Amino acid sequence: MQSLIYLFVAAIGVGLGAAGYFALNLTIIEALLTGLVVAAFCLVLVERNMRRRAHERLERSVQDLSRLLSTDAQAGQALSKRINALESIDAGQRLDVIEADVSVLGTVVRQLAETVADIEDAQGHIGASAPAAAAVPVPTDEDPEEKDELEPVIPIEMLRQAIEEGRLLFYVQPIVTLPGRRIHGYDIVPHLLMEDGEVAGPEDFMPRSGHGDVVRMIESRAMVQAVAFARRAKTQGAPVTVYIPMTDATLANAASRQHLLAQLDANQAIVRELCIKVAEADWKHLSALEDKGLEALAEKGAHFSIGKLKSLRLTFSELMQAGVRSVRVDAKRIVEDPESYTDFHTSDIAPYLQRYEMDLIVTGVTSEQQILTLIDDGMNLAQGPHIAKPGPIREDLAHREPAPARRTASLN
């Protein structure tokens, strides 16, 4: 290509020289000089243009090289951070825990094999003529959570009367962030004002089984109270998450669920601040239903918080798709017996849940030592009587229902 350019320049010089000699009557020397000057001028222009292009190509190459070096530097920094993170991991402690678990598992398997062998030997010694022995029930330890499910001390008739008379109250119990103990959200906690002025907690009057109409009535009013609380808190510039306790008595009932869907649809501005708190047993029952009630609530923006968990060995990806945003564990169990919840190290539980956009809420905190342990393990959401007990809602945030109409009798 360059040879063609030089050939073209020489042709221009020869052509101009010939034109000057034959057309302009120049002498041979003048014509030659004219051709050489024109050819030299063209060569200078060509060389300058070629150098400019070469300089531009060099600049582009330098810019590409700079970008590659920048990318390599970023990759090196990311690799360095990962290496530092790996170096900071104390693998020895985790390996010790795994070795201890394997040892315990081996002991349990050996004891199980010995027990099965003893049972087989005992069955072998029983003759065909031996009289049938009555089965003796083996005493078993009750589930700690089942011990809490005692029948309420307040009769259902008294509860119905109190609700009709407007003596159903709603307190709030805060959930705080650790270690700063700033407010993260509030649980709506129903209470009952007794005739003697005493206030009864939910464990004293909430029905454990049956009486779904009463439960639905209480939970419906709790939802109204939560909507008013969340809306007024957001209006005052301090939005918080409000957790509404509900059971399958409401969520599995088609009419109650439609009313709940209508409430969520009418309060889309604060739907992110509302979260339905459901026990694990009720959640499993609702998930097994075929009417897809949970999916309908999730489509309206409802969020869920699952409490009374017996284990954290759950499929969190499915829970995330179903709208679950937090799970709750008992402080005493997670501190004293974390293996009953999960196989993870306690410091890994909260980060693992955050991968699925879920919070871990530790409930029932009763001592400062439990709080220190939770902080060490990175569990930063807690609730319990040691932090704050349920208390009345502020007047400017509470929803006040109108007093029930009372029948008056005229005296003659």
Image (tube, rainbow, N blue to C red):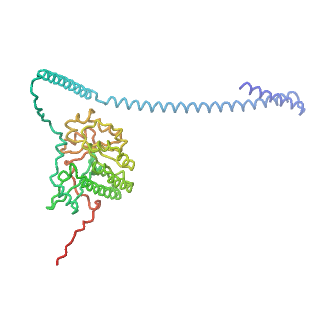
Measured from the top left, where is residue 410 in percent x and y?
A: 19, 75
Q: Check the image and report above or below for 87 versus 279.
A: above
Q: Quadrant of the N terminus?
A: top right
Measured from the top left, where is residue 98 in percent x and y?
A: 25, 27
Q: Check the image and report above or below for 400 versus 184.
A: below
**Residue that protrudes farthest toward the front in the picture:** 129
Measured from the top left, where is residue 405 in percent x and y?
A: 24, 68
Q: Check the image and report above or below for 326 versus 19.
A: below
Whether residue 178 can be seen here: no
Front residue of this view, candidates 215 and 65:
215
- Name the residue: 38% across, 57% down: 266
**Residue that protrudes farthest toward the bottom in the picture:** 412
Q: Looking at the image, how many numbered discs can be counted on the residues?
A: 0
Front residue of this view, candidates 218 and 381:
218
- Name the residue: 82% across, 29% down: 33
Whether residue 316 can be seen here: yes
Q: Which corner quadrant of the image does residue 139 belong to?
A: top left
Front residue of this view, candidates 121 and 38:
121
Q: Quadrant of the C terminus?
A: bottom left
Measured from the top left, where is residue 380 in percent x and y?
A: 28, 43
